[in-house]
Amino acid sequence: MENNREAWKAPFLTVLFIFAGLFFYTKLVGPIPFFVNSVTTTQSSLFKAEGTGEAAGVPKTATFQVGITKTANSPEAAQESANTLANQIISGLKKLGVKEKNIKTVDYSVNPQYRFPTTGEVQQVSGYTITQTLEVRVDDVDLAGQAIDVSIENGANLVSGLSFVLTDEERLKLENEARKEAIDEAKMKAESIAKLSGIRLGKILNVEENFGPLPIPLRAQGSIEEDKAQTEILPGESKVSVTVTLFYETK
């Protein structure tokens, strides 16, 4: 019996001594700091495939600029002449079917003209030039050529910036067509590569979309033919490009 007491007495005293030492240490020095290092590991295995789709359509809207330049001895006379022509142009466009809200003034300037002096003379103003520019939007692209002709017939001597643009509705329709084509191509690529390489594809975790460069509107310079032939406008096609990247989890 005494042997059993001696067997557990020594460990008990050792533990008691350790706790007593810790007690006095914390009283004298303070609490013992404990540090826990946390390590988080994540396993991410993603497979991505990219596809590109394009869609093209013919724009139904055209925009262009027409201008009037008039020079007179006084700014008032030049202004009256320029305003008369501008009103004639606007009236002619309205009769053609162009809405007033689609005609706006984008530039109006008055500049003095100087006569080159001879030796000993002071430079003098010889007249004033007024330039007025209108921006015209034609919702029916087939009327664009007629609108330019009407503007010239009513006094416009500057025609520039002819461009064809897609409406928001037209662009959205083309984007959806291009997007579907891009997704179909990306899926086909992913399935083909996975089958050949032995990868098992899971669900799609993420989708990224990028649009290609926006189509540059066609621009042309208006011209006046001597035989007054009707101006012909060809809008051509505008393209929309969409690139889609699909991210799959792998099993």
Image (cartoon, helix red, strand yellow):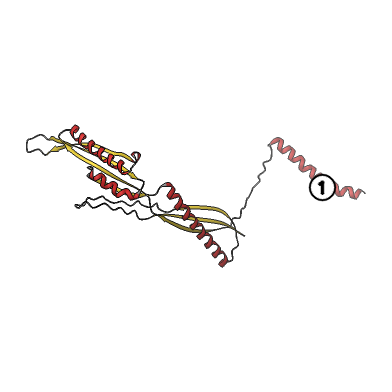
Q: Residue at x 26, y 45 (%)?
A: 150
Q: Is residue 175 left or right of residue 27?
A: left
Q: Residue at x 30, y 39 (%)?
A: 106
Q: Residue 114: name its quadrant.
A: top left
Residue 167 to residue 181: above or below: above
Extreme residue in the left direction: 119
Position of the C terminus by quadrant: bottom right
Residue 66 to residue 76: above or below: below
Extreme residue in the right direction: 1
Extreme residue in the bottom direction: 196
Badge count: 1
Q: Is residue 243 left or right of residue 203?
A: left
Element type at marker 1?
A: helix
Quickly name the residue at label 1. 11
What x and y, as percent, mark residue 134?
29, 41
Report the front residue among 208 and 70. Answer: 70
What x and y, as percent, mark residue 71?
17, 38
What x and y, as percent, mark residue 167?
40, 47
What x and y, as percent, mark residue 27?
71, 35
Q: Residues within 10 Å of mark 1 (few under 14, many from 20)?
A: few
Extreme residue in the top direction: 76
Q: Residue at x 76, y 43 (%)?
A: 18
Three-letter amino acid code of the residue under disc 1: Pro
Report the front residue among 182 and 195. Answer: 182
